[in-house]
Image (cartoon, rainbow, N blue to C red):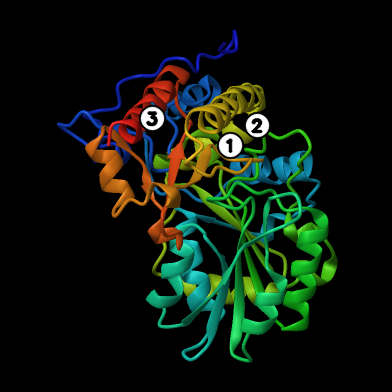
Amino acid sequence: MTDSLYNFDSCPDRRGYGSLKWDKYKGTDILPLWVADMDFTSAPEITAALQARLDHGIFGYTIPFDEPVDAVLNYLQRQHGYEAKAHWLNFLPGLVPAINLCCHAFTAPGDSVMTATPVYAPFLTAPDYADRELIKTPLCLNGADQWTLDFDAMEQLVQPNTKLFILCSPHNPVARVYTRKELTKLADFCERHDLILISDEIHCDLVFDETAKHIVTATLNEQIAKRTVTLMAPSKTYNLPGLACAFSVIEDSKLRLQFQKTIRGIITEVNCFGYAGCAAAYNHGEPWRQALLTYLKSNYELVYKFIREQLPEITFRPMEATYLAWFDVTKLELDNPIKFFEDNGVGLSDGVPFDGNQHVRLNFGCPQSRLIEGLEKIERAIRTR
């Protein structure tokens, strides 16, 4: 079923290359379907750009020069209608350090940080690492059985010392693409309570549901743009996390200066290969991305059908984006879901660090044959326990 130009049905053996995903289970027969790291080779346009950079033979300190800067700006305008300016950008080696630095840059001891759970684990650890209070507001289900922000709970829990709201958009792990109405309501909430909005949009180019559209939060209106720190990277979309290249977009000069002061002497420069991969992804990677989305949608449909028909004990709500399926396994009454599945040959992400007890997350960014093998292991584990 793979696209004729790109092969997603097979991939190289990743064992022995220091892969976090695969070497976690080194020496076992456990199939890794956990961390958000796809098993597909990157777009050939990206590997060609990296080879060209390698052939240059000199790997000195590298500044954010015109090629990656222009690539990011053109991508933001072309893909998301976001007319950003070069001086709004800060290139970073990753979004996790950026989230942690935001907690230091925009809050003080005694302040609190709010986020909606379940959510990507670093959102929950960053405030604590900065000695700030964390306020967790649980997502709720809307009339369409979709996860959404619980604004009533947010109003009840926000405090005078709350300074930040950290948003995951699209939302990992529940795979929601928030609508303009939802984001506008969040923007109003941040305005009303004078909160800075940290908007992690790393999954923004992995929307496979044709009825959903990612909206860059900072494009809603000028008011929210002035209090938003947008965080993005090509890493999730183009499978480049090992190149360590991400960026922030901060329109407000005061916020930008606060952020830049905080990262001085702490954050390393992006390396030359990170810039090369980023520029190639945004300049030449769109055909590959479209083929990827087609493949991921097919994988998602396979997972959804399999769970609904073969494993109704697992609650799995429809997804709109990402390659990360969020399973509620409460009905299985497992003492330790992750250990149970590992003991039966499949490695999933534990829901507990996401604030999702009795949940697991499955990564279907892999060849379909491998995905089927994993699903069959899950079914066999449940049926034979």
**Proximity of marks 2 and 1: CB atoms separated by less than 8 Å:** yes
Left or right of residue 360, residue 251 in this image: right
Q: Which residue is mark 3?
A: 379
The residue nearer to you, when weighing 222 against 373, is: 373
Q: CA distance from mark 3 to mark 2?
A: 42 Å
Q: Is residue 216 visible?
A: yes
Q: Amino acid at mark 1?
A: Ala
**Proximity of marks 1 and 3: CB atoms separated by less than 8 Å:** no
Quarter where residue 383 is shown: top left
Left or right of residue 4, residue 122 in this image: left
Percent of width and height locating residue 381: 31, 33
Quadrant the C terminus occupies: top left
Tell me the element at label 1.
Answer: helix
N-terminal of the pair, mark 3 or mark 2, is 2
Q: Is residue 94 above or below residue 10?
A: below
Quadrant the N terminus occupies: top right
**Proximity of marks 3 and 2: CB atoms separated by less than 8 Å:** no
Q: Amino acid at mark 3?
A: Glu
Disc ID at residue 283: 2
The residue nearer to you, when weighing 273 against 298, is: 298
Tell me the element at label 2.
Answer: helix
Tell me the element at label 3.
Answer: helix
Q: CA distance from mark 1 to mark 3?
A: 42 Å
The crowding category of the residue bearing disc 1, from other C-alpha atoms within 10 Å (few below 14, some 14 to 19, many at least 20), is: many
Disc ID at residue 54: none
Q: Amino acid at mark 2?
A: Asn
N-terminal of the pair, mark 1 or mark 3, is 1
Percent of width and height locating residue 75: 70, 40
Q: Which residue is mark 1?
A: 279
Left or right of residue 230, residue 109 in this image: left
Q: Is residue 264 visible?
A: no
